């Protein structure tokens, strides 16, 4: 809401600065965004009088003028406007002044004639688009004061130089007008509020029945009134109205429309002017629309209506979408002469529904959606009619056409000081509470001293419950002046000993992963359907967004892969040699059994790409591979005190090789593998992209209650023996270890792989395992260990057909 | 030269030779030459059998003495060499060599900020609660006193899945879920992702919030003020000032926004005579929204508003992260450039 400081002061004698006012309003819940200076660009312009005006000797259109700007010498100015003439009062940009486009006036010569300034058009001043000629100014300003030569233009004509941009929360419909602010400020500071004075001259016979009004749904429209004006002449409004509307962000159109907009901004009452002669049947019917009805609104669009949209109709057809936009057919045009001026209140939710559905937000619908004061209608209608008459030369017909099925009844709300004290945590006096409520326009019934009955005013739609009144008391007290205490936090026994929460588990995993040396990534939860398609992921079960911002964000991710691969791409593009990321986030799929129709599973994903180490210093320069990633995954199972899953080759849409991880109970914990090279190209990856995806919810469940069981340290030393098996390449290492496990031996403590050597070009590779032998109660002899070693070696050779 | 003379000459010879040794290998060669099994001493000892029995004891004694002195000489040289090597190592040691690092792990600044906030409230005794990111209209709006067509819905442009299912626009839905499930008293915080249909320099369509809720028998607005002032001081330092300002949220009444003194200019509004860029000259930074739980919310979840009162607050994690770590571009949070991530080591 743009609030003109000057305009406000016409209502209330506020003496501080605009900034001080803004600060005060902010602390009253009406936050000042900034103080804007709409006419700053022309603050250097002064008022001047054209003394002489002659044709330029070397031009067919330029004029050579002398202009008195109150200085000792008149200024010589060459002016190209066709309408310039001696005797005119004009805006002058003297040398040194800046124009809105940034042009700084300098002494110049135009075709040999010196020119020390410029006489301006409205367009040059950034006021309107009018560039037909220079702006010729009136001798007196709107207050009736004669302007002086050399006076600053913006001061002389009392332009709205300071405008407070205030953000209005949806509950404060009462502050959507200059008057609304004046009322609040007056109440808070105890200043008198002066309503604008006007003279309404009603003429002719009583026309209050000339346009009968019928309201078919009193909930939709509690009250509808209108006045008839005759003999209007449509034309531009006077400058002061146009500039003022301009200052508060409204484009001036014509005197009739500008009058309604002026009253809208001043009093907050939306008005609509119909061309009275085009209202068929000379009557008004207010009713809800039926499904499928149509109306062409004044922007020329045909609108398809739904049941419940508010409609204003004449004797035959809809003529306006109630509170949202007028109809094209009954629009005021340059030929209009007779006006039916509508002033009504409508049900906020209906207006909002219609305006939202048709994307037809306007200054009027904005106010109707939030609530327009029904007790201010009569004044607003009279004031608007008088202003319209003044601007257009129309006469106002006697009488008001109206229908008020639901006259305003002030809500009565209880207020207990004790309750306010309990909620706010401070002590209050009855006097303070009463002062606050009365300053807001409430009427108090204090017959029960402890439980007041408060009648709230028509402009405060937000004061309907005791909590609402308590808030007002808090605001007037100053929410920054209440006490500060630290409450005791209630604890219940139930919450102790509960399993670790999802959040704590996640945080523990994040710290583990970061501690391991991985970098945490955070990606958007939405991706494009095409990203999922690209990875060959199934289309079924995806959760699409109905109203996505872009096609790149039109579906919730079913896996974390698209985001992390994109991160790899981004990092490669930025020249990174190695990328090691992890992310923990939800994956979304449809699930009819969920109350949200969506299943959310928390995943942990890793991606590895490129160099194993960031620094070349003190490291061999090698790329990461399967073993790096698998090591991370194995460590993770260990971290969760879970046995390693079975790793088995699987088919996968975007990984090859893809290794599925299956838990002992058969559930699948995730997959690990390399992004298919054909797909990796799209992510700029020239090297292998290693990726792992784990179901974190499943692993959390599985790891609950698992913790370390301490193993006694051995007393006697171990003896180690290595064996190298020469095996075909198709033989997996775990087959060797499994064969070892099958050997009956009482001395073997553990067996582990220590090396795999693959001679070039061969069909075979050397698998070296290290065997650790130990007895819990004595030191082993070499002989018995060698025997065991032989036993194991020959058993493996026999079982797998490998050589030693 | 007789045998004894030859024997007594050995230490002198050894000394000469030792003086010429430079390396460990030289030293070893000299040792073998003099003290080895076929070395000079052994050779002379072997000739002892040519002596008369009377000469032998004297020679034997002399040989022992020579042997000891040879060993002494040798070990002295050995020790000297070791000392020299150690001195050379120390002299040549380069303390400026960069350290060998394996991987530089990091937590995302959003995670770090979230943890910092959560830990303040956990220490106060709040419990962490959660809820789904895809929510029902009821949990996200209706139960929070935002019926359909409420103008407050304009404050949050929503991404919808269906007409009644949406991506939560705030973590306040966690309040609703928790209250529907549990009886008062309650003290919870709910961190998580939230979504709005909004994308520009200062908005990303996904961001993070932390919701807080305290419900008990006599919770007051003064409690709210104390709690949030404590929070701001804990995260931003004891000198940080806090300002409460009336505002509007459908689910709280009274509603307040909380500002803290600007982290850049310390609340002055200007730095070196220029208006502060972080707070745009106001000296204040909006940091969170809060208020006393609206009675309508209690009614919606089946609590009796005459029995309990409470306060709720919600804060933007990105905002905290930006202020705390001096981040300038919101979008950088979601690009996951490793050069960015590496700046937040753990």
Image (cartoon, grey):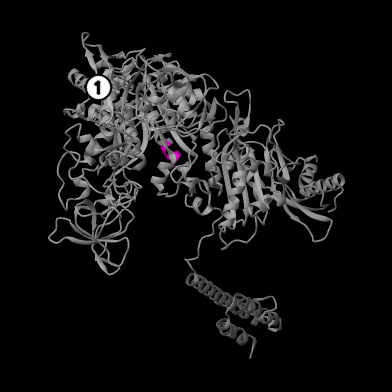
Characterize the local packing of mark 1: few (<14), some (14-19) or many (20 or more) Cα atoms within 10 angstroms: some
User: What residue occupies the far bottom of the structure in this picture?
Assistant: B1
Provide the major secondary structure of the magenta segment: helix
User: What residue occupies the far left of the structure in this picture?
Assistant: A72
Q: Is residue A330 above or below residue A799?
A: above
Residue A422 image position (x, y, % from top left): 28, 19
At a point 34% along the width and 33% down the height, the residue shown is: A257
Q: In which image quadrant can residue A159 be found?
A: top left
At a point 16% along the width and 27% down the height, the residue shown is: A190
Residue A155 image position (x, y, % from top left): 19, 46
Is residue B85 visible to the viewer in this orientation of the structure?
yes
Secondary element type, mark 1: strand
Name the quadrant of the N terminus of chain A. top left
Chain under disc 1: A
Q: Is residue A518 left or right of residue A327?
A: right
Q: In which image quadrant can residue B253 be found?
A: top left
Q: Is residue B114 above or below residue A96?
A: above
In the image, is residue B82 part of the stretch drawn in magenta? no
Q: In which image quadrant can residue B236 be found?
A: top left
Q: Nearer the viewer, residue B233 or A138?
A: A138
Residue A304 image position (x, y, % from top left): 53, 26
Q: Nearer the viewer, residue A317 or A187?
A: A317
User: What residue occupies the far top of the structure in this picture?
Assistant: A447
Residue A407 image position (x, y, % from top left): 32, 13
Q: Which residue is mark 1?
A: A203
Name the quadrant of the C terminus of chain A. bottom right
Q: Nearer the viewer, residue A303 or A444?
A: A303
Is residue A44 visible to the viewer in this orientation of the structure?
no
Q: Is residue B98 left or right of residue B246?
A: right
Residues in magenta, as a range: B113-117
């Amino acid at each position: 809401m743009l609030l003109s400081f000057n305009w406000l002061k016409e209502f209330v004698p506020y003496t501080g600065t605009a900034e001080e006012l803004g600060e005060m309003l902010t602390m009253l819940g009406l936050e000042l965004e900034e103080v804007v200076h709409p006419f700053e660009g022309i603050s250097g312009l002064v008022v001047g009088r054209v003394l002489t005006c002659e044709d330029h000797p070397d031009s067919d259109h330029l004029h050579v003028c002398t202009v008195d700007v109150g200085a000792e010498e008149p200024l010589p100015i060459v002016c190209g406007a066709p309408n310039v003439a001696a005797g005119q009062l004009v805006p002058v940009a003297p040398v040194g002044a800046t124009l809105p486009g940034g042009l700084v006036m300098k002494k110049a010569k135009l075709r040999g004639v010196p020119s020390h300034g410029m006489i301006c058009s409205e367009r040059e001043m950034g006021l309107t688009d009018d560039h037909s000629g220079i702006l010729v100014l009136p001798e007196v300003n709107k207050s009736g004061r004669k302007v002086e030569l050399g006076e600053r233009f913006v001061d002389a004509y009392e332009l709205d130089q300071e405008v407070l941009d205030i953000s209005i929360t949806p509950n404060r419909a009462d502050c959507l007008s200059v008057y609304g602010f004046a009322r609040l400020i007056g109440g808070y500071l105890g200043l008198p509020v002066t309503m604008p004075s006007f003279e309404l001259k009603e003429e002719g016979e009583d026309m209050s029945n000339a346009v009968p009004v019928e309201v078919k749904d009193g909930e939709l429209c509690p009250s509808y009134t209108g006045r008839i004006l005759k003999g209007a002449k449509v034309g531009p409004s006077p400058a002061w109205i146009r500039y003022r509307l301009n200052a508060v962000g409204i484009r001036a159109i014509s005197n009739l429309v500008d009058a309604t907009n002026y009253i809208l901004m001043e009093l907050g009452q939306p008005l609509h002017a119909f061309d009275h002669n085009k209202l068929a049947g000379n009557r008004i019917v207010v009713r809800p629309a039926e499904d499928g009805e149509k109306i062409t609104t004044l922007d020329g669009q045909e609108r398809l209506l739904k049941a419940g949209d508010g409609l204003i109709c004449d004797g035959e057809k809809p003529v306006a979408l109630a509170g949202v936009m007028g109809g094209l057919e009954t629009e005021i045009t340059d030929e209009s002469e007779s006006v039916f001026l509508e002033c009504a209140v409508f049900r906020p939710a209906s207006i909002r529904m219609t305006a939202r559905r048709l994307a037809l937000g306007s200054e009027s619908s904005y106010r109707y959606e939030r609530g327009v004061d029904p007790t201010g209608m009569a004044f607003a209608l009279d004031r608007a009619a008088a202003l319209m008459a003044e601007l257009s030369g129309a006469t106002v017909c006697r009488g008001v056409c109206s229908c008020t099925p639901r006259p305003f009844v002030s809500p009565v709300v209880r207020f207990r000081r004790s309750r306010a004290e309990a909620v706010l945590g401070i002590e209050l006096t009855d006097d303070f509470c009463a002062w606050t409520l009365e300053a807001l326009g409430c009427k108090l019934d204090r017959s029960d001293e402890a439980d007041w009955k408060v009648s709230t005013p028509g402009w405060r739609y937000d004061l309907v419950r005791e909590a609402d009144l308590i808030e007002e008391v808090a605001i007037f007290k100053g929410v920054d002046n209440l006490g500060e205490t630290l409450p005791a936090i209630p604890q219940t026994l139930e919450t102790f000993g509960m399993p670790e929460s999802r959040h704590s588990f996640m945080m523990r995993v994040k710290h583990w992963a970061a501690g391991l040396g991985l970098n945490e990534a955070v990606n958007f939860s939405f991706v494009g359907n095409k990203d999922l398609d690209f990875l060959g992921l199934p289309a079924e079960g995806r959760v699409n967004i109905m109203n996505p911002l872009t096609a790149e964000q039109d579906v919730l991710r079913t896996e974390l892969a698209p985001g992390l691969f994109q991160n790899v791409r981004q990092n490669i593009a930025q020249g990174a040699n190695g990328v090691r990321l992890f992310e923990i986030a939800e994956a979304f799929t449809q699930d009819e059994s969920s109350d949200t129709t969506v299943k959310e599973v928390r995943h942990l994903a890793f991606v590895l790409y490129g160099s194993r180490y960031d620094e070349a210093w003190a490291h061999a320069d090698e790329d990461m591979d399967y073993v790096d990633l698998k090591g991370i995954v194995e460590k993770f199972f260990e971290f969760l005190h879970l046995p390693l899953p079975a790793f088995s080759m699987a088919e996968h849409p975007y990984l090859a090789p893809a290794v599925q991880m299956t838990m002992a109970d058969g559930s699948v914990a995730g997959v690990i593998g390399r992004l298919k090279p054909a797909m990796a190209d799209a992510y700029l990856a020239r090297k292998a992209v290693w990726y792992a995806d784990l179901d974190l919810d499943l692993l959390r469940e599985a790891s609950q209650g698992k913790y370390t069981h301490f193993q006694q340290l051995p007393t006697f030393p171990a003896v180690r023996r290595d064996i190298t098996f020469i095996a075909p390449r198709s033989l997996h290492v775990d087959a060797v270890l499994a064969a070892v496990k099958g050997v009956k031996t009482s001395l073997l403590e553990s067996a582990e792989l220590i090396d795999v050597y693959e001679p070039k070009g061969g069909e075979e590779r050397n698998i070296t395992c290290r065997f650790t032998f130990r007895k819990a109660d004595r030191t082993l002899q070499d002989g018995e260990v060698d025997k065991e070693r032989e036993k194991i070696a020959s058993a493996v050779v026999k079982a797998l057909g490998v050589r030693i | 030269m007789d045998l004894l003379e030859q024997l007594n000459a050995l230490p002198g010879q050894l000394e000469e030779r030792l003086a010429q040794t430079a390396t460990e290998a030289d030293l070893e060669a000299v040792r073998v030459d003099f003290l080895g099994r076929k070395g000079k001493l052994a050779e002379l000892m072997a000739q002892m059998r040519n002596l008369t029995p009377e000469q032998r004891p004297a020679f034997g004694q002399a040989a022992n003495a020579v042997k000891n002195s040879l060993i002494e000489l040798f070990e002295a040289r050995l020790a000297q060499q070791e000392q020299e090597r150690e001195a050379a190592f120390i002299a040549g040691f380069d303390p400026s060599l960069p350290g060998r690092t394996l991987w530089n792990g990091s937590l995302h600044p959003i995670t770090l900020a979230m943890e910092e906030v959560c830990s303040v409230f956990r220490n106060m005794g709040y419990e962490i609660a959660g809820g789904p990111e895809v929510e029902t209209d009821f949990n996200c709006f209706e139960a929070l006193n935002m019926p359909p067509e409420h103008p407050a819905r304009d404050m949050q442009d929503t991404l919808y899945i269906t007409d009644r299912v949406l991506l939560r626009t705030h973590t306040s839905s966690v309040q609703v879920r928790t209250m529907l499930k549990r009886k008062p008293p309650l003290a919870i915080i709910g961190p998580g992702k939230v979504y709005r249909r909004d994308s520009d320099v200062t908005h990303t369509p996904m961001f993070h919030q932390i919701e807080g809720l305290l419900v008990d028998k006599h919770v007051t607005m003064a409690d709210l003020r104390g709690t949030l002032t404590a929070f701001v001081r804990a995260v931003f330092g004891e000198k940080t000032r806090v300002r409460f300002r009336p505002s509007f949220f459908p689910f709280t009444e009274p509603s307040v926004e909380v500002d803290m003194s600007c982290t850049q200019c310390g609340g002055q509004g200007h730095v070196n005579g220029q208006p502060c860029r972080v707070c745009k000259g106001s000296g204040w930074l909006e940091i969170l929204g809060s208020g006393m739980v609206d009675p309508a919310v209690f009614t919606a979840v089946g609590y009796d508003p005459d029995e309990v009162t409470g306060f709720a607050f919600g804060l933007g994690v990105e905002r905290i992260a930006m202020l705390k770590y001096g981040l300038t571009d919101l979008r950088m949070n979601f690009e996951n450039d490793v050069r960015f991530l590496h700046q937040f080591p753990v």
